[in-house]
Amino acid sequence: MPDQRNGKSCPVCCGNTMEEFLFLPGVPTHCNLLWESREQAQIAPRGDLRLGFCRACGHVYNLSFNPSLMEYTQAYENSLHFSPRFQAYAEALASRLISQYGIRGKDVIDLGCGKGDFLALLCNKGGNRGFGFDPSFVPEIMEKASAERMTIIQDFYSPRYAGYQADLVTCRHVLEHIQAPREFVKNVRASIGTNSSTVVFFEVPNVMYTLKDMGIWDLIYEHCSYFSASSLAVLFSACGFKVGEQSELYDGQFLGIDVAPGNPAGEPLPDVHDRVAAMNSDRAAFAENYRRKVEEWRKLFDEKKDGQKFVVWGGGSKGVMFLNTLRPGKGVEYMVDINPRKQGMFVAGTGQEIVHPEFLRRYRPETVIIMNPIYRDEIRGQLDGLGVKAEVLVA
Ligand SMILES: [Zn+2]
């Protein structure tokens, strides 16, 4: 396998047209990992984000990604799963797949099934039998009702499991973590073999959402690949799948793709020229806006008066990337988070202490920086409740 870490070849189409457009040196390799002391946090493992854009297929990839820095076996907690809105979305998606493809009383495989939540939905809603693969799966937490229908293998899915056959194969939010996505998707295709009725569904974050909506704090080391609709289609065609429905999901934040097995040697590649051309101007604008936004924030921290206090509200990966990109030093000494498991811990890379909102009552910051504008009113209300008259800025 060619070493893609320092090379410029595209992991999706193998073209040599990867062009670097954004460089973020030394970001934490695990944004969501919290540390028990400031000293530990400040020496948390780091890696470089060197984003390349493929002019041939529209894929975005971290050219400096080093998989040996990732520890996949740790329990990976995606905070989205706690959100009722995300839950409702997952339920609707499971219902759609079951009814559209008649998946009732059948076998379902979920690759990278996490705690098995989505697989349980597919099994319970359609009376299906489920097989999940995930090295970070913790068996104790599975509900008994689900356990009867589901078998989870605590391992990565690989050709040794090709004996597991299914009518529906799903894989959500996994592909963006994988250094060699072609190999992974080819393995899935090989496992299906001649079982032509199998339906396959993959879901990944949508890079266009990040580029167009300036989600500049959404770029994280854990994701080596950032898929566009075109690079996703190219990947599956190249790996022997016929591309069916492609959809923007969850307000455009995710991309879904329904595929069916085709010629294992490769299906005709879709014409992506126009889509890639449109993306090219978006990513150029993104790089420019990124630099401008970072400069504006740096200026704000540089001009901070003595004794003036800023805090960041929100301990998710956006907040961690905001701090690690700007490295405001003493300019920001605390991060606020409502999750009690995060309080008392320290931010990877920059080492701010994470505090309960109540802390602000005596700390009295002049400025509260929030990561997501949709929480502005909610946070404003909490600040008013605490008697904190801080200015609220959106990162
Ligand atoms: Zn490419």
Image: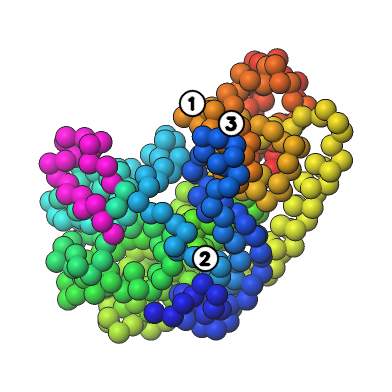
Residues tagged 1 and 3 counted as in contact (Cβ below 8 A):
no
What residue is rendered at 69% in x and 33% in y?
A: 333
* First of labels 2, 1 by sequence position: 2
293 vs 334: above or below: below
Whether 139 is among the magenta residues is yes
281 vs 252: above or below: below
Q: Is mark 3 within 8 Å of ligand 1?
A: no
- Residue for badge 1: 340
Residues tagged 2 and 3 counted as in contact (Cβ below 8 A):
no
Give the image location of residue 279, x and y in percent.
61, 69
Residue 65, which numbered label? 2
Give 143 or 29, whichever is nearer the viewer.
29
The total number of labels drawn is 3
Q: CA distance from mark 2 to mark 1?
A: 32 Å
* First of labels 1, 3 by sequence position: 1
Give amino acid for label 3.
Answer: Ile
Tell me which segment is drawn in magenta: 137-156
Q: Is mark 2 within 8 Å of ligand 1?
A: no
Q: CA distance from mark 2 to mark 3?
A: 28 Å
Which corner quadrant holds the N terminus?
bottom left
250 vs 190: above or below: above
Query: Does dot 2 land on a helix, a strand or a loop?
Result: loop
- Residue for badge 3: 354
Give 388 or 270, whichever is nearer the viewer.
388
